[in-house]
Amino acid sequence: MSLVELTGATATYRRSGISFVALRDVTLAIEAGERVGIVGGSGSGKTTMARLMLGLLRPSAGDVSFQGRSIVGLRERQRGWLRASASMVMQDPNSSLNPRMRLADIIAEPLRSPVLRRRGDVPAATPAVLDAAALGVGLEPDLLRRFPHQLSGGQRQRAAIARALVSDPALLVADEPVSALDVSVRAQVLNLLADEVRERALTLVLVSHDLAVVRHLCQRIVVVCAGEVVEEGPVDVVLRAPRHEYTRALIDATLSL
Ligand code: ADP
Ligand code: MG
């Protein structure tokens, strides 16, 4: 059983009454413990694919399953296990963290969810647990009293990573996790992600338009172009011998600088 499976998944958005197919007939299985990079140009459908995997978007056709169970049309009450088992780190920590909450509460929030509490193996959100969560992502526990706007961009993204990991998920989806950060802190945040993924043997889906980042963090690469998967395979194979024109163009644009 794969951890995540998309089967003929199609995603359609409605824009002023007109439907627009953002992702077409995608079939893809991600195994537990795998690290998969999803690459493609802006608007190619990467974030849409991530949202399908997390059950944040319902496919207009096809199926999406997590841990062998279809997540299409889950009722709100059944979504808890999915939220506890699959976390996301978004591109922009400015908009993904609640500006009115202190860091301690932002990181503790998943631990306080009733569904997660029922899972039993989840620690209570005690000060010691939160301090450890902060230290685990390289944040001094003093910072837990601050609000997001009182942190740097890199610190905010570290907090977003702490929040995503605090529920001990099986899957981490990171959608362009460093694109909004200063170039000077990108490598640190990527290294933190890489360390956490390895230590926890997490399944990682990393959305990126940067092939160098994918080469560094992932084993497998999925290339998306205009809503379709055009190529897929082990990172070293795809980057050494790309079969699709679009992959070649991406390599020329981002790896040969
Ligand atoms: P990427 O992450 O690769 O940049 P997205 O998955 O965000 O691409 O978007 C794929 C396509 O779907 C784009 O053309 C985008 O404009 C469109 N799109 C994304 N989200 C929405 C939405 N909520 N409503 C309408 N169109 C959308
Ligand atoms: Mg995107």
Image (cartoon, rainbow, N blue to C red):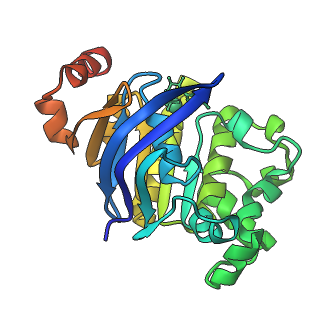
On-image quarter of the C terminus: top left
Looking at this view, is 220 or 46 the one in front? 46
Looking at this view, is 75 or 248 the one in front? 75
Q: Is residue 77 visible?
A: yes
Looking at this view, is 242 or 150 the one in front? 242
Q: Is residue 30 above or below residue 191?
A: below
Q: Residue at x 85, y 44 (%)?
A: 147
Instruction: Count all numbered tags in the image, as a single digit.
Output: 0
Residue 210 position, x and y percent, is: 38, 28
Residue 80 position, x and y percent, is: 65, 69
In the rendered view, does 5 fall on the left or right side of 240?
A: right
Q: Residue at x 47, y 52 (%)?
A: 53
In the rendered view, does 19 fall on the left or right side of 246?
A: right
Looking at this view, is 39 or 54 the one in front? 54
Q: Residue at x 55, y 66 (%)?
A: 85
Q: Is residue 237 above or below residue 113?
A: above
Residue 123 position, x and y percent, is: 68, 78
Q: Residue at x 77, y 54 (%)?
A: 106
Which quarter of the figure has residue 141?
A: bottom right
Q: Is residue 217 visible?
A: no
Residue 185 position, x and y percent, is: 56, 32
Q: Residue furthest bottom?
A: 120
Which quarter of the figure has residue 81?
A: bottom right
